[in-house]
Image (spheres, grey):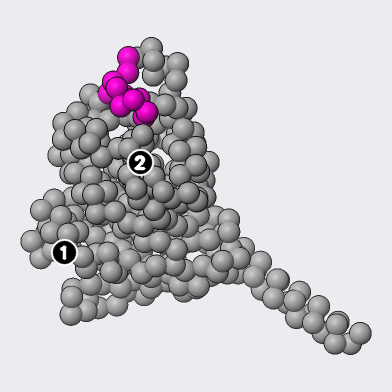
């Protein structure tokens, strides 16, 4: 009985400690207090690491940043979020994204968070519940400096990184120019937001664990009138896709080239996700969940070739 009581006491202490940590964290967020962080000096690859202390639900909270010497004042931040508990440093050192960032005057951010499997709703991939979204914003401000704290954000995530991207967009729609999320089986509910940045909900034809959840999330957004693209990649399982990287980069490039995102969105059209035929306004109004938004130009042409109904 004594051993049992001690065990119960330790469990209660653990639970109390976890709750206290969570309350303190969210109290600071609500009060807009600065989050504790540390910014390391750039390494040999000119990568700057920003570290946050662990929280009750996040074991690792690191962000990696890079910008070209040719782009000292970037026009936007491109955030790349890997799969569950992955390290985004590997993404921003990829030659493809570094060349892309240099060509479009972007800074790069690689997300590197980790949560235990037991934290489902409080996982870092839920940016609102866990506070990881506020960490991302604080990291960007710290890296770029106060004058650039409101810089526009492009965000692209895979698997748990897609949940991270989508939930970040829902909470910070006014900061996001455009986004893409690929291959996740647990999305947050789509909501009406202040802004409705155009986005891509993508999955592989053979990604059984994510296909159904992803199309339902896309349809939630389309019911709300969000300008989202549905993209199914033929014979692809739960893995990253080079053709998708190229599609997303072209999509982001078109957004960056526009003077007005609103005009860019309104100049696009809607296509049936099964037949790939262009839809009339009446057809879109009657069946919005089967209508993918598509911009004019090369992105539309690429979708017609790449999308597998």
Magenta stretch, residue numbers? 269-280
Res. 277 image quadrant: top left
Tag 2, which secondary structure?
Answer: strand
Residue placed most toward the observer, 250 or 35: 250
Number of on-image labels: 2
Q: Residues within 10 Å of mark 1 (few under 14, many from 20)?
A: few
Res. 47 image quadrant: bottom left
**In this rendering, is residue 198 above or below 241?**
above
Q: Residue at x 42, y 26 (%)?
A: 290
Q: Residue furthest front?
A: 235
Q: Nearer the viewer, mark 1 or mark 2?
A: 2
Q: Which residue is mark 2?
A: 232
Residue placed most toward the observer, 222 or 257: 222
Q: Residue furthest bottom?
A: 2
Magenta residue check for 277: yes
Left or right: 212, with 24 as reference point: left
Magenta residue check for 270: yes
Whole-percent x and y of residue 171? 45, 46
């Amino acid at each position: 009985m004594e051993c049992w009581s001690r065990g119960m006491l330790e469990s209660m202490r653990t639970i109390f400690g976890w709750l206290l940590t969570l309350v303190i964290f969210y109290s600071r967020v609500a009060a807009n207090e600065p989050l504790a962080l540390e910014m390391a000096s750039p390494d040999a690859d000119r990568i700057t690491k920003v570290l946050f202390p662990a929280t009750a639900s996040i074991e690792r909270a690191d962000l990696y940043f890079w910008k070209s010497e040719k782009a000292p004042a970037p026009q936007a931040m491109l955030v790349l979020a890997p799969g569950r508990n992955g390290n985004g440093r590997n993404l921003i050192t990829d030659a493809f994204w570094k060349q892309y960032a240099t060509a479009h005057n972007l800074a790069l951010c690689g997300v590197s968070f980790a949560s235990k499997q037991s934290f489902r709703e409080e996982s870092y991939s839920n940016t609102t519940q866990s506070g990881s979204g506020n960490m991302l914003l604080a990291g960007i401000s710290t890296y770029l400096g106060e004058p650039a704290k409101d810089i526009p954000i492009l965000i692209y995530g895979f698997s748990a990184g897609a949940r991270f991207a989508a939930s970040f967009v829902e909470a910070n729609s006014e900061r996001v120019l455009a986004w893409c999320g690929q291959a996740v089986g647990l999305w947050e509910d789509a909501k009406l937001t202040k802004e409705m940045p155009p986005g891509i909900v993508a999955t592989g034809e053979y990604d059984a664990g994510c296909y159904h959840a992803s199309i339902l999330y896309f349809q939630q957004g389309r019911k709300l009138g969000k300008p989202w693209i549905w993209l199914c990649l033929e014979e692809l399982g739960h893995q990253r896709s080079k053709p998708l990287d190229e599609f997303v980069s072209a999509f982001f490039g078109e957004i960056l080239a526009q003077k007005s995102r609103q005009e860019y969105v309104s100049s696009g059209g809607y296509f049936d996700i099964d037949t790939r035929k262009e839809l009339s306004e009446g057809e879109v109004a009657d069946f919005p969940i089967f209508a993918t938004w598509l911009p004019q130009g090369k992105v539309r042409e690429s979708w017609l070739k790449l999308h597998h109904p």
